Structure formats: structure tokens, C-alpha cells
Image: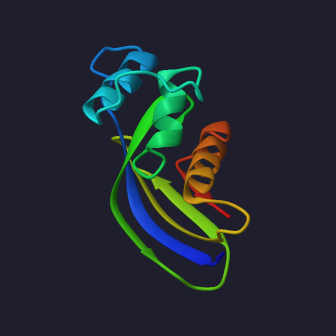
Amino acid sequence: MSQTEYHIGKLVPVDLQGLPLEKMCQKICQEKGVIEISSLYESWEEQVKYDFYDQYYVVDGVIYSLQDHTEGSDESHFMNMRRESDGTIHFVTQFYNGGTCLSEMVEDGISRMNKNNANEYKE
């Protein structure tokens, strides 16, 4: 059943440790016990994005880890994000899950901040 969701959390950039994005995605998958790319996906990035959508977000070449996440419910739709100097993003969002999901809200918010070269995004 669809409902309104409310989320507060923090998105912390993952240190790529000098690895290309695809190699870090492979490493994350392997640490989670996934040793082969599923036939459903074309890359390790897609594997992370779709299998671990509640833990990691890959946007514009950066992997973010979801931390300090709290979920609740209410009635309206919004997204507020603020980027700190270390790249960490704090967010508060609320949406009706019959039309979107947390990963889409997060990815869209980060993309909009990046597109506008801003440290804040409010919808």
C-alpha cells in the first residue's frame, strides 16, 4: 500500500581509495557478498545502485553512503539538502511513495545541487 514517507539522514561520500568508480562499486558488492554482476545489470555501478539502494547512492561519479537515517510519516512533499565542506550531505525529505522512492528523491536532489553548483537544495 502506498503512503507518505518522511526521511532524515546524512549522505557521506565514500572514499574511493584511488580506485575508479566501477572498481569501488565492485568492492562494495563483494563486501556485501555479491561476487558476480547480475544478468539484470550492465555494471557494478548498476548493481550497487539497484541492489543496495537503501544504503548507497551513486550520483555524478560520487558514491554516497546513507547514515543516521530516520523514517517517519506525514502528509506533504518536499526535499531539503545541505552540503558540508567535507562533502557530507544532510537531508530531510517527505514524499508519497506511490510516485517516487527515497533513492529517486536523493539522486534528484544531489543532481540539482550539482547542476546549480550550490550547497543547498530546497523543493
The spot of residue 70 in percent (x, y) is 38, 71
Camera sees residue 57 = no
Considering every residue shown, the one lying at the far front of the view is 39
Considering every residue shown, the one lying at the far bottom of the view is 74
Quadrant location of the C terminus in the rendered image = bottom right
Residue 39 appears left or right of 2:
left
Quadrant location of the N terminus in the rendered image = bottom right
Q: How is the image coloured?
A: rainbow
Q: Residue at x 38, y 16 (%)?
A: 23
- Seen from the viewer's position, the closer of residues 9 and 52 is 52
Q: Residue at x 29, y 36 (%)?
A: 32
The spot of residue 11 in percent (x, y) is 40, 50
- Seen from the viewer's position, the closer of residues 8 and 44 is 44
Residue 78 in which image quadrant: bottom right
Camera sees residue 111 = yes
The spot of residue 31 in percent (x, y) is 26, 31
Q: Residue at x 56, y 74 (%)?
A: 5
Q: Residue at x 43, y 34 (%)?
A: 63
Residue 76 appears left or right of 89:
right
Residue 22 in which image quadrant: top left
Vertical position of residue 122 compared to residue 45: above or below: below
